[in-house]
Image: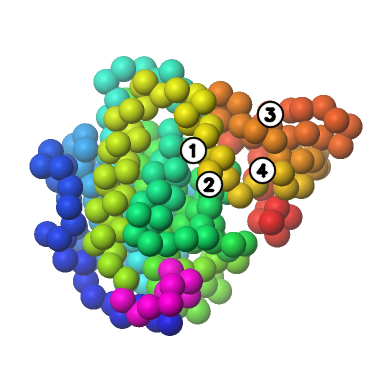
Amino acid sequence: MPVSYKPLDIKTISHNEDIEIHYFDELDSTNSWLKDNGNCGDVCICESQSEGRGRRGNRWQSPNTGNIYFSMCWCFDKKLKYHSLIGLIVGIATAEALADTGVSGHGLKWPNDIYWQSKKLGGILIESSSQSERLIIGIGLNISITNSVKARIGQESTSLSEILDKNEFSRELLLSHLIYRLNKNLKQFNSLNFDDFIHSWNNWDILKGKIVSFTHHGIKISGLVDQLDEFGRLGIIKNNGSLEYFSTADIKLRPQETI
Ligand code: BTN
């Protein structure tokens, strides 16, 4: 059912007083805007992006209004113990925010994709600016995408308007929960307990126990997805029984092979 589009009513998005929300009809990219203009804690949201960026140099198709194109500038005051887990923590916050808003049946595909059943619902792009402790966290969520945008995405994707059985969906409510969850999870990041992290991750993980195949340095590898390690690397039990961990930079899982 198509969700009727209304521009965001920014003043109804609840957030702490120390967070400033910058809202635009159109931008090149909310990540780029915040990188150049944002202070720590600021949020940038827009209705469409002309140069939306995805991971691995991909474009994030963003001509449609009515979706979520969101970025937050987050600063840590000291070097991070588990730097490589940040993207996973942001994924958990996003999944939690969707659940807070009444969405169910979604999950996380390592490292940074939000999935609903076997289709991509959203993605996360984390970029660091000059100082490594200042991060730009970008989140794109499909609320209502047209068929022509879907055709351009290049992988199976879905949107909340297809999933939810209602034609009203409050993006403001989802954004309020998202800001709350991000703040909570990122504030706790430096005192992160790995057991708690892995417990939360396992709640949302859609790959564990699945057979996957991917190419690693030109070599085709397949195996059974096991637990993440303390660096957030994906454990794979290979066909010969050995367990090997792969970092985000190493591999690109192809969705049609994983679900
Ligand atoms: C992915 O490739 O899955 C990550 C997509 C991230 C898209 C979001 S939309 C808001 C923010 N601004 C951008 O240019 N990209 C991110």
Query: Can you see residue 215?
Result: no
**Which residue is pictured at 65% across the width and 33% down the height?**
227
Residue that carries the numbered disc 3 in the rendered image: 245
Q: Where is residue 140 in the image (x, y as percent from the top left)?
A: 40, 56
Image quadrant occupied by the C terminus = bottom right
Is 165 magenta? The answer is: yes
Which range is magenta?
A: 160-168
Residue that carries the numbered disc 2 in the rendered image: 204
Element class at badge 3: strand
Residue that carries the numbered disc 4 in the rendered image: 208
Residue 26 vs residue 160: left or right?
left
Element class at badge 4: loop
- Mark 4 residue type: Lys
Disc 2 + disc 3, Cβ < 8 Å: no
- Mark 1 residue type: Ser
Disc 4 residue crowd, few under 14, some 14–19, many 20+, Cα 10 Å: some
- Mark 3 residue type: Tyr
- Mark 2 residue type: Trp
